[in-house]
Structure formats: structure tokens, C-alpha cells
């Protein structure tokens, strides 16, 4: 009770003295030149219209077309045409409004933000920002609205009406941007230590900007709401980012399926990559992959509570193995003239592992991991007469789309001969037989002529 009385007296004294401190709800204006807090209206302009944005909680911040525009409920003077209005407050689900501004007209929208996320627990530390105007914007681990955690005047007091930014232990990237212009005032990576209060003096010399002090209150805290504000007080408890990445098979053959799954909590931006190539952007999910080479999957999850990187590697074996063998490696071939009298045949047994394309020369393409070719008749390469003694070679080539390949050969020994057509000797023909009814007189006449011719020849020889 004594503490409450002292706080009330301090606030009253400050009010009487007219002191202008950077506290939530003070008289300091955070509205940009083209916005008006309250219900005041100005003369209509032919190129603009007015949108009244009512926000809850009252500390919420308004972005128009991705530009920081106004703190608390405000009346915005906007150019005619379509606009995107977003309302953010850490610990609440943001709301988006797509509006069309009509020249000279006034309209109202209301953003009643709903709390989001479970209460936060430690270990944690505290960041306090000093020497900066209270309306400056504070972001952790990014500078888009999803990383916005509040204003300096919500985290710059450790005297009374405590104003605390409580964050997870570890490295945090702090960005302090100027109100409305978003010009960088201070930025850096800091180490948040358990149960310690880190004070950032933004305008001090670099070696004097970071000061650590004990924060024993942190050890006594259990669970905190993500956002809570009161009179001259505010507590922003930022949840840590958590993520995980897994593959169901860390070692696979070429083109075998792999399930890649990931999950994250309290992350504003996520990306999963495969060998540095973007694969997905969802905060959680699973995909089937068929990697063609050893692949490193990386999951990057970033939010106001930190940046977490996870990775998993899938080793791809592109080694191809192939074998080829004949069922009968000795064959005979005999050919006489134009007739093949003997010709054997063989089959080729084959196997191919981790391959998606298999060719056997001269058979052609085969499918599967193993098999036996149809019977192959082995024909000699020579075609001239003589003995045959040849070795015939068959080759298998197996490849995969991962760049692996293998070859193997099988041989068949062919023996035999090629012989010419054998020569056939014709037998002497007997004299024709006379028909039984034929007369012998013509034959006797012929015989007589032969006798007379022969006698005359002998007589001429004696005269010589």
C-alpha cells in the first residue's frame, strides 16, 4: 500500500510541475503531420479523405501502406484511392483493413485486437532504452511490423510505474527507429543475460552505450502476459522463438523419397532452404523430396523473441552397380554351303542397382533391377570358309539422374566352321537301249560305213 501511495504522489507532483516524461498516456503527441487525434475535423480537400481508426488496446500502433503512421486511435488524412491499414500491438493478433478513401469523405474503422499466444516464462533478461524520445519505435530481430514490440516510453523507466521490455536470454538484434520517418536511431546485436537489466544509452559514445545491472526481480517472476499496461506502467514479455527441422531418412539412394518436416512457434518470418534454394515459407509443414545430390536443408525462423536456425542433411548415394553374365558361355556354329547345320543360343542374366536407365548392347533397353534377356543366337562375324574361333562381347550400361553410372561386360566363346558346298562327280551314261521293235538294218549299215572308212585310212598310210 505504501508503494502505491508513493507512486500516486509522484505522479501527482509531476502533473503539477508540468513535467513532460515519456510515459504511456502522457500529453506527448505521436501523430504524424497528416493525422489528427480525437474528433477534430478540418476542411475537406478534393484530393484527400479522412479515416478514423479506433484501436484497442490504446497503445496499439497504426501502419498505412506498410509505413508507420500513428500511435493510438487517430484520424488519418489520406490520399484518395485504396489503402491498406494494419494495426499492431505485441501480444495481440494484428488486424488488417483494406479501405478506399473518397475525396472529402470521412469514415470510421475499429480494431479490437484479440490477445494471441500463451503466457511467457523464463529464463529472461530485460532491455531498457534511454536517451531517446519516448515515441521512438522499438523492433527486435527485424524492422517490419511483425517485429515491432513497442515504444521507448514503454521500456525506459526503472524508478516507479515500472516500464519493462522482458526478452529471452541470448543474442537479440535491437532496432530503434524514429517515429513516422522510421529513420534508424540505434541498432545493434546485444547479449541478453539471465536476470540482468541491459541499459542501452543510445546517444552515448559506442563504448559506453551498453550497461548491465542486476535484475533480481526476474528470478521471482513465473509466467507473464505478453502485454500489460497500466497508469505509467507497461510490461512487454516477449516469447522465445522455437523451431525444429527433421528428415525421415538421412541416407538415401538416388531419387529415393525423403520427408522433410518443420515447425516453429512465435516466428514472424520463416524460410526453409534446400542447398540455399528456397523451398517453403510456411511456419510449419512437410514436403516429400527426391534429392539428386547430398542436400542440406536449413530452416530459418525469426521473430521478436530471437532468431533460430535449424539444419538437417540428407546424404545421397549415387553409386550404380551392374552385372551381366551368359547362361551358356560356349557356343557352336556350323554352316555347310548355304545351310546352317548347328547354331546354339544363350540368355543374358543382368542386375542393376540404384539405376533408372539400363541398356544392354546389342539387346536394347531393359527395365527393372534384374532380369534375363530372351535367347540370343550367336552368329559368327566371319562369313568365309574355314574354322570359327571368336569371342562375342555383350555390354550393360546402367545410369541414374544423379550422375552415377556403371558398365559391365559378358563374353561368349563361339567355335565351329563354315564349309563350302561339296562337289558332286557325275557318272558315265550308258548307251541308249534300242527299242525292242526297232529294225537292226540301220545299225548294220552304220557299222559297214565305219569299217569302210577305217580300211581306207589304213591303205593311205601304207602308200606313204
Image: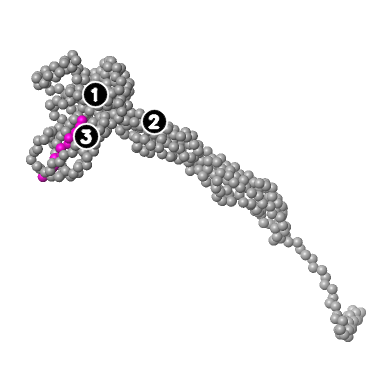
Q: CA distance from mark 1 to mark 2?
A: 29 Å
Looking at the rendered structure, the number of numbered marks drawn on it comes to 3
Q: CA distance from mark 3 to mark 1?
A: 20 Å
Q: CA distance from mark 2 to mark 3?
A: 33 Å
The answer to whether residue 16 is visible is yes
Mark 2 crowdedness (10 Å alpha carbons): few <14, some 14-19, many ≥20: some
Numbered circle sitting on residue 244: 2
Q: Nearer the viewer, residue 329 or 306?
A: 306
Q: Which residue is tagged 1?
A: 235
The answer to whether residue 449 is visible is no
Q: Position of residue 463 (x, y in %)?
A: 91, 81
Q: Position of residue 117 (x, y in %)?
A: 30, 30
Q: Position of residue 79 (x, y in %)?
A: 15, 42
Of marks 2 and 3, the one in the foreground: 3
- Residue at the spot 29% in from the left edge and 17% down from the top edge: 220
Q: Quick one: label 3 or label 1, which is nearer the N terminus?
A: 3
Q: Position of residue 47 (x, y in %)?
A: 12, 44
Placement of 384 over or under 107, stated as above or below: below
20 to the left or right of 434? left
Quadrant in the picture for residue 133: top left
Q: Which residue is tagged 3?
A: 112
Quadrant of image for the N terminus: top left
Amino acid at each position: 500500500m505504501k508503494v502505491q501511495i508513493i507512486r500516486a504522489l509522484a505522479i501527482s507532483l509531476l502533473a503539477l510541475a508540468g513535467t513532460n516524461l515519456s510515459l504511456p498516456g502522457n500529453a506527448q503527441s505521436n501523430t504524424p503531420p497528416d493525422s489528427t487525434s480525437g474528433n477534430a475535423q478540418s476542411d475537406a480537400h478534393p484530393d484527400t479523405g479522412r479515416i478514423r481508426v479506433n484501436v484497442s488496446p490504446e497503445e496499439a500502433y497504426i501502419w498505412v501502406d506498410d509505413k508507420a503512421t500513428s500511435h493510438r486511435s487517430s484520424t488519418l488524412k489520406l490520399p484518395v484511392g485504396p489503402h491498406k491499414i494494419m494495426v499492431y500491438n505485441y501480444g495481440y493478433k494484428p488486424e488488417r483493413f483494406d479501405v478506399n478513401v473518397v475525396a472529402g469523405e470521412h469514415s470510421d474503422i475499429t480494431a479490437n485486437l484479440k490477445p494471441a499466444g500463451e503466457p511467457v516464462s523464463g529464463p529472461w533478461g530485460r532491455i531498457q532504452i534511454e536517451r531517446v524520445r519516448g515515441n521512438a519505435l522499438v523492433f527486435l530481430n527485424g524492422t517490419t511490423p511483425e517485429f515491432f514490440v513497442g515504444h521507448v516510453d514503454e521500456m525506459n523507466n526503472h524508478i516507479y510505474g515500472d516500464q519493462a521490455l522482458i526478452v529471452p536470454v541470448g543474442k537479440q538484434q535491437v532496432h530503434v527507429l524514429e517515429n513516422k520517418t522510421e529513420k534508424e536511431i540505434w541498432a545493434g546485436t546485444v547479449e541478453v543475460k539471465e536476470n540482468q537489466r541491459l541499459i542501452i544509452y543510445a546517444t552515448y559514445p559506442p563504448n559506453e552505450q551498453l550497461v548491465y545491472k542486476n535484475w533480481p526481480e526476474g528470478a521471482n517472476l513465473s509466467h507473464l502476459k505478453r502485454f500489460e499496461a497500466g497508469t505509467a506502467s507497461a510490461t512487454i514479455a516477449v516469447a522465445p522463438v522455437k523451431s525444429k527441422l527433421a528428415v525421415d531418412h538421412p541416407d538415401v539412394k538416388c531419387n529415393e523419397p525423403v520427408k522433410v518436416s518443420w515447425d516453429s512457434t512465435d516466428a514472424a518470418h520463416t524460410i526453409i532452404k534446400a542447398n540455399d534454394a528456397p523451398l517453403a515459407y510456411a511456419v510449419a509443414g512437410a514436403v516429400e523430396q527426391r534429392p539428386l545430390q547430398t542436400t542440406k536443408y536449413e530452416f530459418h525462423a525469426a521473430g521478436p523473441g530471437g532468431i533460430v536456425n535449424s539444419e538437417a542433411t540428407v546424404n545421397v548415394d549415387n553409386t550404380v552397380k551392374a552385372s551381366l553374365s551368359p547362361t551358356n558361355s560356349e557356343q557352336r556354329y556350323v554352316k555347310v554351303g548355304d545351310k546352317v547345320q548347328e547354331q546354339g543360343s544363350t540368355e543374358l542374366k543382368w542386375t542393376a542397382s540404384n539405376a533408372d536407365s539400363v541398356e544392354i548392347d546389342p539387346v536394347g533397353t531393359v527395365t527393372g533391377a534384374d532380369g534375363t534377356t530372351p535367347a540370343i543366337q550367336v552368329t559368327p562375324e566371319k562369313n568365309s570358309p574355314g574354322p570359327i574361333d571368336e569371342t562375342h562381347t555383350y555390354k550393360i550400361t546402367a545410369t541414374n539422374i544423379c550422375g552415377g553410372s556403371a558398365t559391365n561386360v559378358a563374353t561368349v566363346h563361339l567355335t565351329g566352321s563354315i564349309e563350302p558346298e561339296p562337289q558332286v562327280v557325275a557318272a558315265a551314261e550308258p548307251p541308249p537301249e534300242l527299242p525292242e521293235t526297232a529294225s537292226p538294218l540301220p545299225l548294220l549299215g552304220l557299222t559297214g560305213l565305219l569299217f569302210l572308212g577305217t580300211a581306207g585310212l589304213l591303205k593311205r598310210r601304207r602308200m606313204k
